[in-house]
Image (spheres, rainbow, N blue to C red):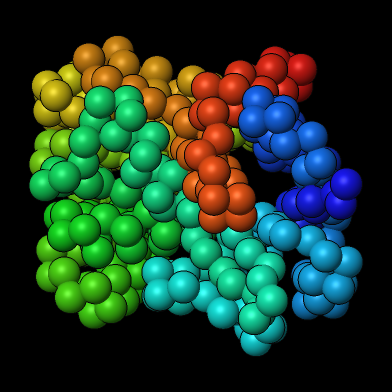
């Protein structure tokens, strides 16, 4: 029996839930010869580490922070058209002919929304943040023809990202701005996707809404209540904690909410499919992620 090797490269990596998630998927499919490990790889070691994995017979890898963009600079992989456009790769497939790169983060977000009953087709999407995660997701919705508004603490970054997406996807309904436009954008949005680190770690008690200026005499809750569309969906890509302050605020105002657990699961499931050609059991993967999160708490 030859061992089929998979893994994730990142730095830091000890917190990664990917090994538990993929190991559970292999078990459920009785792929007992497949193993998935987490490897701490520094940015300056990335190219050599990927080449070594190739020499060692790895079949697939995930890349996480800080490697997703950097791998493209190495020149050793062939990105698919979407990963190339976005400029970020989170999945590598090793084949005889070379190393192929994919980006399953955005498709993971889309699958999470769809399976939660929030089909984004034709919907107006508001993206909070303009970092790496916002970039992949905004590109995908831009490409799908959605109206996409990106707002960020640093307005210029959102404007620049939106302009790039508009040019590269040909979608002129992609625009960017700052938090000063937050309340009016909220009133337009069908789906709001929170991609910043607000709600996590030292920002655990901060919500995106806390950063919006309040008109005189209005409370935050009143503003959310009056601005949020009645059918709005609030999606936070953060999965730890499972309910961020953003989701709590949105839920109070009646929004349907979704956290980042299923996005994590679907980006993994899509990578799994690229590597093995098999559809893993996402329920089993989600269970492994939730168990891992409980252990952390
Ligand atoms: P990621 O790859 O996870 O998206 P990133 O590329 O470092 O991370 O981007 C971080 C995002 O979180 C940015 O949109 C950042 O806003 P700025 O561009 O203004 O820095 C946002 N962010 C981080 N801390 C924030 C805070 N305290 N308030 C508002 N936005 C914040």
Residue at 42% from the left image edge and 59% from the top image edge: 136
199 displayed left or right of 136: right
Q: Count the labels in the image.
A: 0
160 displayed left or right of 30: left
Residue at 69% from the left image edge and 17% from the top image edge: 291
Q: Quadrant of the C terminus?
A: top right
Q: Nearer the viewer, residue 269 or 156?
A: 269
Q: Nearer the viewer, residue 106 or 20?
A: 20
Residue at 16% from the left image edge and 45% from the top image edge: 121
Task: Locate residue 162, reporting x and y percent.
Answer: 28, 68
> Residue 250: in sight, yes or no?
no
Task: Locate residue 65, reporting x and y percent.
Answer: 67, 57
> Residue 19: in sight, yes or no?
yes
Q: Is 61 located above or below residue 194 in the figure?
A: below
Q: Nearer the viewer, residue 82 or 213?
A: 82
Residue sitting at the far front: 1
Give the quadrant of residue 205.
Answer: top right
Q: Is 127 located above or below residue 248 in the figure?
A: below
Task: Locate residue 39, reporting x and y percent.
Answer: 84, 53
68 displayed left or right of 9: left
Residue at 14% from the left image edge and 24% from the top image edge: 231
């Amino acid at each position: 029996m030859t061992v089929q090797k998979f893994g994730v490269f990142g730095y830091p990596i000890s917190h990664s839930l990917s090994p538990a998630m993929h190991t559970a998927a292999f078990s459920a499919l009785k792929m007992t010869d497949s193993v998935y490990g987490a490897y701490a790889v520094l940015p300056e070691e990335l190219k050599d580490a990927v080449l070594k994995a190739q020499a060692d017979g790895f079949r697939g890898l995930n890349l996480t922070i800080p490697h997703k963009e950097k791998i493209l600079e190495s020149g050793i992989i062939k990105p698919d058209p979407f990963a190339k456009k976005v400029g970020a790769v989170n999945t590598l497939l090793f084949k005889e002919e070379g190393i192929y790169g994919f980006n399953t983060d955005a498709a993971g977000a889309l699958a999470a929304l769809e399976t939660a009953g929030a089909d984004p087709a034709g919907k107006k999407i508001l993206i909070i943040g303009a970092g790496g995660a916002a970039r992949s997701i905004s590109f995908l919705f831009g490409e799908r023809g959605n109206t996409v508004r990106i707002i960020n603490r640093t307005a210029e970054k959102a404007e620049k990202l939106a302009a790039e997406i508009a040019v590269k996807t040909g979608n002129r309904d992609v625009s960017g701005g700052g938090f000063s436009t937050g309340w009016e954008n909220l009133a337009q949005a069908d789906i709001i996707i929170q991609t910043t680190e607000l709600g996590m770690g030292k920002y655990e008690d901060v919500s995106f809404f806390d950063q919006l200026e309040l008109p005189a005499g209005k409370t935050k809750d009143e503003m959310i209540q009056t601005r949020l569309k009645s059918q709005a969906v609030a999606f936070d890509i953060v999965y730890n904690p499972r309910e961020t302050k953003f989701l709590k605020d949105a839920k109070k105002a009646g929004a349907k909410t979704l956290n980042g657990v299923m996005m994590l699961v679907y980006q993994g499931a899509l990578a799994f499919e690229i590597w093995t050609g098999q559809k893993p059991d996402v329920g089993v993967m989600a269970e492994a992620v939730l168990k891992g999160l409980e252990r952390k708490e």
